[in-house]
Amino acid sequence: MCQRARRVAPLQKVDPLVSLVYLWDQLEEGSVGTLLSLEEQILNSTFEACDTQRTGIVAVTHVLAYLEAVTGQDPQDARLQTLACNLDPNGEGPQATVDLDTFLAVMRDWIAACQLDGGLELEEETAFEGALTSQQLPSGCPEAEEPANLESFGGEDPRPELPTTADLLSSLEDLELSNRRLAGENAKLQRSVETAEEGSAHLGEEISALRKQLRSTQQALQCAKAVDEELEDLKTLAKNLEEQNRSLLAQARQTEKEQQHLVAEMETLQEETSTQWRTEKSHLRSRRVGGGTRWAQNGKLLAERNGVKRRSEELATEKEALKRQLYECECLICQRDDVLSERTRHVESLAKTLEEYRMTTQELRLEISHLEEQLSQTHEGPDELPEGAQVRRVGWTRLLPPSLGMEIEAIQQKQLLLCQKQEVAAAALASPLCGVWQWEEVIIETDEEVEFPPEAPTGAQVAQKRGRGGSRAPDHGQFPQPSGGPSP
C-alpha cells in the first residue's frame, strides 16, 4: 500500500511523431514489402490531402501545416524545422513548392532521421529514468528494480504505451474502406452533376430557341402594327374619297338642274321663235314698212338660240367630264376595297401565325417542366445530394427568364386589340360607295326626259362584283362615249 501511495507522477502523453516512428519500427519487424506499400500509401495520402487542386505541386507551407495539424506539434519543433529546411533548401519561403517525387524522397529521409533520433532519445530517457528510480528505491526492495514496478515508486515505465500493429492495420483498412466509399459517392455525385449540366445545356438550347421564336413573333407583331397603320391611312383616304364623291354628286345635281332649266328656256325660245317666224313670214309681204327692224329682231333671236345651243353643248361636255371623274373615283374605291380585303386576309393569317406560336410556346413550356421533373427524378433525393450540388441545381433552374410568360401574355393582348381594330375597320369600310344609290336615282329620273350617254356602273353593281369575289380592277382607259348632245 505504501508503494502505491508513493505513485505521484502521471503517465506522459505519447508523442505523435514517436508513434509514427514506432509504426515503421513495428513494420520493420514484419515484411519489407508491406512497409514500402504502407509507407507509399501514407505519403501519397498526405500529398493528395495537401494537393486539393490536383496540380501535382504542393506548397511547403501546406505540407508543414498539415503535419502540424496531424501530429499536434508546435511549428517551432526542431524536427518540423528540419523537414522545412529539407523541403525548401533554397529558402524561398511561402513561395516554395515541391512535387510528388521530391516529397517522397525528402519524407523518407526525414522519417529515417526521426527513427534514429527517436531511438537515441529513447535510450537516454530510459537510462536517466533508471538512474533516478535506482536512487529513489528503498533498500531491501528487489522488486522495485524491475521496470514493471518502477511506476509504484514514483518512476515511469520507459516504454511508451504505443498502439499495436493490428490496431493500426485495422484503422488503415477502415480508412481504405472509407476512401472507397467516398470515391463511389464522389463518382455518383459527379455523374449527377454531369446529368444536371447536360440538362442545363439542353434547357439553355430550348430557351434560345424560344427566344428566337419570340423575336420572330415580335417581328410579326411589328408587321401587324404596320398593316394596322396602313389600314388607318386607307380609312382616312376612303373618307376623303367619300367626301369628294358627295361633292361631285352635288355638282352633278346642280349641273342637271341648270341643264334642265336651260333646256326649258331653249324650248320656250324655240317655240317663240317658230311662232314669230311663222307670223312674220305670213305678214312679210303685207308689211313691208318697218321690215328691217323685224329682220334685226329675228337675227337677234337666232343669235340667242345659237348661244343657248352652245351653252347646252358645254354643259353636256362638262357633264361627261364629271361622269368620267366619278367613274374614276368609283374605280379607285374598288381598288382600295380590294387592297383592304387583301390586307385583312394578311392580318388574319398573321393572327393565325401568332396563335400557332402561342400553342408552340405552351407545348415547349410543358416539355421544359417535364424535363425538369425527369431531371429531379434522376437523383436519389434532395437530402442525399450535397449542399453544393443543390445550390448548382437551384442556380441552373433559375436560369429560365421570368419575363417570358409576361411577354407572351402581352403579345396575346396586343393580338386581341388588333383583331378588334380589324373588326371596327371592316364595319366602317363595309360600304365605301355611300352616295352611288342617290346618283342612280337621279339618273333614272332624268333619263325619262332627256337621252344621255351610257351610265357608269352603279354602286349595286360594284357591290355585286365584290360579293362575287372578283379582285380584278376595272380598266381605267375605257370610258363611256357620249352618243351626242340632246336634240333641241
Image: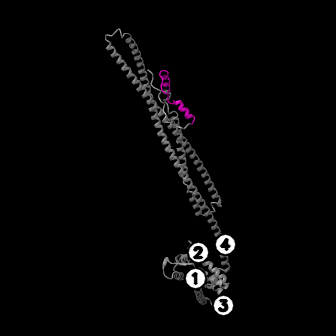
Asked if the residue at tag 4 contacts the one at tag 3, i.e. Cβ–Cβ closer than 8 Å, the answer is no
Q: Mark 1 points at which residue?
A: 105
Residue 79 placement (x, y as % from top left): 54, 82
Q: In which quarter of the image is residue 29?
A: bottom right
- Which residue appears at 58% of the width and 74% of the height? 49
Let me know if residue 65 appears in the view: no
User: How much space separates mark 3 and mark 2, taking CA atoms?
Assistant: 54 Å
Asked if the residue at tag 4 contacts the one at tag 1, i.e. Cβ–Cβ closer than 8 Å, the answer is no
User: How much space separates mark 3 and mark 4, taking CA atoms?
Assistant: 51 Å
Q: Which of 419 and 398 is in front in this view?
A: 419
Q: Give the range drawn in magenta.
A: 440-469
Mark 2: which secondary structure? helix
**Mark sitting earlier along the chain (3/1):** 1
Mark 1: which secondary structure? helix
Q: In which quarter of the image is residue 277?
A: top left
Q: Mark 4 points at which residue?
A: 177
Q: Mark 2 points at which residue?
A: 48
Residue 253 placement (x, y as % from top left): 44, 25
Residue 41 placement (x, y as % from top left): 63, 78
Mark 3: which secondary structure? helix
Mark 4: which secondary structure? helix
Q: Nearer the viewer, mark 2 or mark 4?
A: 2
